[in-house]
Amino acid sequence: MASLLKLKQAGFSELAYQFAQFIYRLDQSDDQLVAITAALLSEVMSLGNMCLNLAQVNTENHILSNDLPEHSADWINQLKQSHIVGKVGEYTPLILTDDGLLYTYRYWQDEQTIARGLQHRLNPLNEINLTQMHTDFADWQSHQTDQIDWQKVAVFMALTRQFCIISGGPGTGKTTIVLRLLQLLNKQDPDLNISLAAPTGKAAARLQQATSHKGHHYEAKTLHRLLGISEHKEKGRYDSQNPLPVDVLIIDEASMIDSSLMALLLSALPQHARLVLLGDSQQLASVESGSILSNLCQHPNQFSTKFAQQLTTTTAIQLADIATDNTALIDSVVALQHSYRFDEHSQIGQLARTVQSGDIQAVYNVLTDELWQSQCDNTRIQQAVLAGYQNYFEAVHQHQDPVECLNLFERYRVLCALKQGPQSVAAVNQLIERFLHSKAWRTQQAFYHGRPIMISQNDYQQGLFNGDTGLILQNSSGQLHGYFLIDNVIKQVDINRLPAHDTAFAITIHKSQGSEFDNIAILLPEDDSPLLNRELLYTAITRSKNNLTLICTDLCLTKTVEQQHQRESGLAKLMTSPAL
């Protein structure tokens, strides 16, 4: 047991230690290697990885180096001797692949289900009204005359393939694509049962608002609601035996879908159903394990000769580069290239692109004194974050109507990498509330006039969802209520009936996904954190439409840009394997 006791000395979590103990008891062996490896697996899973890549574990400087094989091949062979470590296709607590990826059985099964469900749909559709499609694309006036209109390519792909991914950053026209796709799908077949969904309530509400237009009304649901998942039904009401009643499923913000949820979704989709995923593959991955969109978008804009010819015949678009390597997802992934929000001269656009590239010197070349504040003491932070809320503070002080207050509040937000600790959401919210208390705001009370809140738990009865933002304001009688702007209509909720929520002057970058603000402040911590990476910073930067202030030290900025968070997964390779 001495080696297992080292786990706590090495800083392993209690969960990892207990998992190792559990595996050790199951293994019933004097060799503790399987249990130690299980602890390593638990630790990487807690960071969002699907599996432990034995070849990537640095054993040289590891506190457990004396207990781990020097070479991954030896490690794999030793693990294979255990009766609780099975190979692909066996039913054991741990699954080890031939390339040295170690999974828990559940995560291995999830990945297999995803790969199988997608491989089944990597086909062109047979029943297409090409005459109608040709007419529709001829009527579609393009704003891009000197280059490829990737919006048209995306819509054409979604109309002709059973599965497709449309990836693009903010302002690349994903909402326009959904609207045009819905319009053309109805012309192809008005009897199609089309469903819209998104991972979060806020994203679903935004999708529904964007797609509700004259003649058609679509109800966009959260994936949990679509599948009938609840605390009493973890796997939902639908599965392969009782599939979803849908012909076409369009999902927005797909980067936020974790592997377990995607596995449930693909199990519940009927065999004939089409699936369209939209999102930004460069954004943060899901909170839970997996990075599906990133895994599937490694080789975008790869097209077969046949697809390119059909595209030209229908839309007159010429694709210059035709794929020579027959990737598994050929003709199925479009990466949108043109930003309608950030032109080549936009500082925010340039900053986002340089952060994506990982070139720290290019990032420094873009940053100006207006964009970057490298001093992180509380006084400087307070000055920076309060500046954006001044109009909102004044509106609350003057007791302006809820619509005006909400509109002013939604123009600006402080985004933090961390929820707790120095330079975190909690620290900034406390800093702002202390300042407001000095201005006679009653911030010491649980509810006070002007307190912004973000809902953290879906409440279908109240029509409020995780990520919805509202304000606590006094009505004309001086009573406090929660006010939310839903579909441009004010919703008033008694404070005693509000679902779980948090103060929201500052929110995490994770929580900001899918939101947009005129101006933002981004605060990164001075202390090193495993959460800091270029995907996090890119996500934060692209929440702003006009201006931003980045508050962090140069050391923190360098580490963040140079660190790329790549989650271990076998999904990309599985997609190239023979049909499962």
Image (spheres, rainbow, N blue to C red):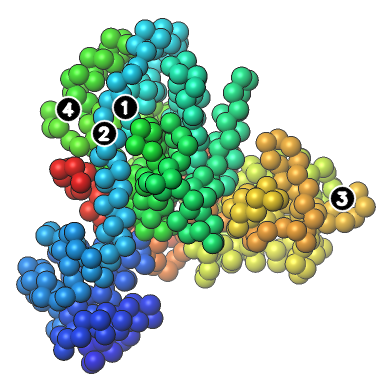
Residues at marks 3 and 2, CA–CA distance in whole angstroms: 56 Å
**Do labels 4 and 2 touch, CB within 8 Å?**
no
User: Which comes sooner in the sequence, label 4 or label 2?
Assistant: 2
The type of residue carrying mark 2 is Leu
* x and y, in percent, of residue 272 in the image: 35, 32
The type of residue carrying mark 4 is Ala
Q: Is residue 104 above or below residue 391?
A: below
Horizontally, residue 282 falls left or right of residue 500, namely left
Q: Which residue is mark 4?
A: 323
User: Which comes sooner in the sequence, label 1 or label 3?
Assistant: 1
Q: Which residue is mark 3?
A: 475
Q: Which residue is mark 2?
A: 122
Horizontally, residue 74 falls left or right of residue 261, namely left
Q: Residue at x 55, y 37 (%)?
A: 220
**Do labels 1 and 2 touch, CB within 8 Å?**
yes
Front label number (4 vs 1): 1
**Tag 3 secondary structure:** loop
